[in-house]
Amino acid sequence: MTAVLELRHTGFRYRRADSAALEDVSLTIEEGSGVGLVGESGAGKSTILSLLLGLSSPTSGAVWFDGAPLNRRDRAGMRAFRRNVQMVFQDPYSSLDPRQRVDRIVGEPLSSLRLATGSAARERVAEALTAVGLPADAALRYPHEFSGGQRQRIAIARAIVSRPRVLLADEPVSALDVATRIQIIELLRELSVAGTTVVMVSHDLGVVASLCERTVVLRSGRVIEQGPTRTVLGAPAHEYTRRLLASVPRLPR
Ligand code: ADP
């Protein structure tokens, strides 16, 4: 297995914050092996996603992509990175621009990353919409015409239109009703079976257990334990993980 993304001894402190949000975090995202990030609120999960997405730079340590440290001054390298690491946010109501038609929304990464224009771009958008289970005519409509679950499909279509190797997802189903959740989890599973590496933050350990081969448990900006999900969540080594398992909601099987 090859490492597609890594944090190496990474620390992060927000500006004007008294303490570090992350301290000496090391984790490896292997190509094709989904990773779940779990831990109580404030543990540092979202901060890790923002580092893995290249939105923030570590205060110490480094983010590695494809075997090399991420270098913001390397423009070609950053374009390859952006094409390959995409993000799905929690709330499909605020993450889609209501004034833009779906074809513009989904096609945006193709134009901003200069991957395709014109009919080639339209084909890629249609392909992405089909992959997430939306009808082709969805392209000509606006976000308000869709339900929450369909909007999350649009957000996922935008995230996969550049054919990324890694999809980062921050609580991708927690804003959705229970029936829709199961459908979106199924869609993420299909994408992961098709080869996309899904890195997910979820407070729902059932979702993590069903989608992620590996789990990283965080607390106060540090890794408490990490390893295969069946070990970490099935036979946790730490009291903190056991408490987390006892306290969080789970998806009905
Ligand atoms: P999680 O996603 O696990 O809830 P976060 O990554 O959001 O945790 O937060 C990690 C730590 O960083 C917390 O102590 C939080 O209060 C702090 N933090 C998060 N965002 C900011 C910010 N914009 N400015 C200052 N501190 C922040």
Image (cartoon, rainbow, N blue to C red):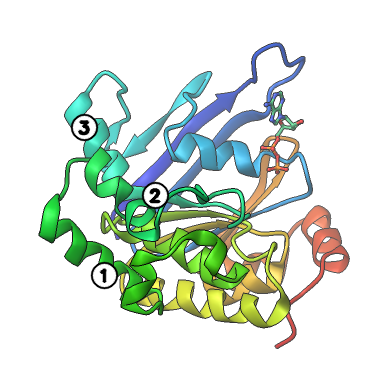
Q: Are marks 1 and 3 in contact (CB under 8 Å)?
A: no
**Front label number (2 vs 3):** 2
Residue under label 1: 126
**Mark 1 or 3 closer to N-term?**
3
**Residue 229 image-quadrant placement:** bottom right
- Residue appearing at x 56%, y 62% in the figure: 144
Residue under label 2: 86
Element type where label 1 sits in the image: helix
**Front label number (1 vs 2):** 1
- Residue appearing at x 20%, y 62% in the figure: 122
Residue under label 3: 77
- Residue appearing at x 33%, y 52% in the figure: 104
* Structural distance between the alpha carbons of marks 1 and 3: 28 Å
Q: Is residue 113 above or below residue 104?
A: above
Quarter of the rendered image showing ligand 1:
top right
Let me know if residue 207 appears in the view.
Answer: yes
* Left or right, residue 141 beside residue 149: left
* Left or right, residue 131 beside residue 238: left
Q: Give the total of numbered labels.
A: 3
**Residue 178 image-quadrant placement:** bottom right
